[in-house]
Image: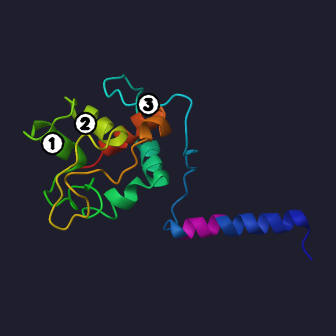
């Protein structure tokens, strides 16, 4: 009969093996602690504020925890504009699509750079609705199906990390 500590060791070893198996046998990195909900230093909606340096790996986890990938990666291009050029009907990555929107005659937002446009798209998603393709499920006139309160839900660091992640797509 096993003692309590032996049972714990066996359970922990099984858990590690299970995680490794799900990850193709590769070591499992310790994830960042991402806490959805209101933050003490919200990013707000001023796209001109200076943000700290971003961490793309942490930004990827924020996107996963917040559910962003459900619409912009796995659901793209029908639920939300695709982040990956391979799944974008226009073949544009997130940053290329942002640059294209800023230069468009029908863009009326304040963003002047790709980073500002992405910031704006996250915290004020109704300022510019990316024109949908024929198979898209979002209306051009809006409102966006994306939550409009990320300016209060994401810290300045969270937003910087998320932007760093978005800029990794090609």
The N terminus, quarter of image: bottom right
Relative horizontal placement of residue 52, taking residue 99 as reference (left or right): right
Quadrant in which residue 77 is drawn? bottom left
* Residues under numbered marks 2 and 3 in contact, where contact means CB atoms less than 8 Å apart: no
Mark 1 or mark 2: whose residue is earlier in sequence: 1
* Residues under numbered marks 1 and 2 in contact, where contact means CB atoms less than 8 Å apart: yes
- Residue 54 visible within the image: yes
Residue at 26% x, 56% y is 82
Relative horizontal placement of residue 35, taking residue 162 as reference (left or right): right
Local packing at callout 1 (Cα closer than 10 Å; few below 14, some 14-19, many 20+) is many
Mark 3 or mark 1: whose residue is earlier in sequence: 3
Magenta span includes 19: yes
Which residue is disc 1 drawn over? 101
**Relative to 126, is 71 above or below?**
below
Relative horizontal placement of residue 109, taking residue 28 as reference (left or right): left
Quadrant in which residue 75 is drawn? bottom left
Mark 2 or mark 3: whose residue is earlier in sequence: 3
Which residue is disc 3 drawn over? 43
- Residue 55 visible within the image: no
Q: CA distance from mark 3 to mark 1?
A: 23 Å
Quadrant in which residue 43 is drawn? top left
Which residue is disc 2 drawn over? 117
């Amino acid at each position: 009969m096993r003692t309590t500590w032996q049972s714990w060791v066996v359970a922990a070893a099984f858990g590690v093996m299970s995680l490794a198996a799900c990850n193709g046998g590769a070591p499992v990195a310790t994830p960042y602690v991402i806490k959805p909900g209101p933050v003490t230093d919200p990013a707000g909606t001023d796209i001109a504020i200076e943000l700290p340096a971003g961490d793309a790996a942490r930004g990827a986890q924020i996107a996963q925890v917040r559910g962003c990938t459900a619409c912009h990666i796995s659901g793209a291009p029908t639920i939300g504009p695709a982040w990956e050029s391979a799944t974008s009907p226009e073949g544009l990555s997130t940053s290329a699509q942002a640059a294209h929107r800023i230069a468009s005659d029908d863009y009326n937002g304040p963003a002047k750079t790709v980073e500002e446009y992405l910031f704006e798209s996250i915290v004020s998603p109704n300022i510019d609705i990316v024109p949908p393709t024929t198979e898209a499920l979002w209306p051009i006139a809006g409102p966006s199906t994306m939550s409009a309160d990320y300016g209060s839900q994401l810290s300045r660091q969270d937003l910087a990390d998320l932007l760093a992640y978005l800029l990794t797509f090609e």
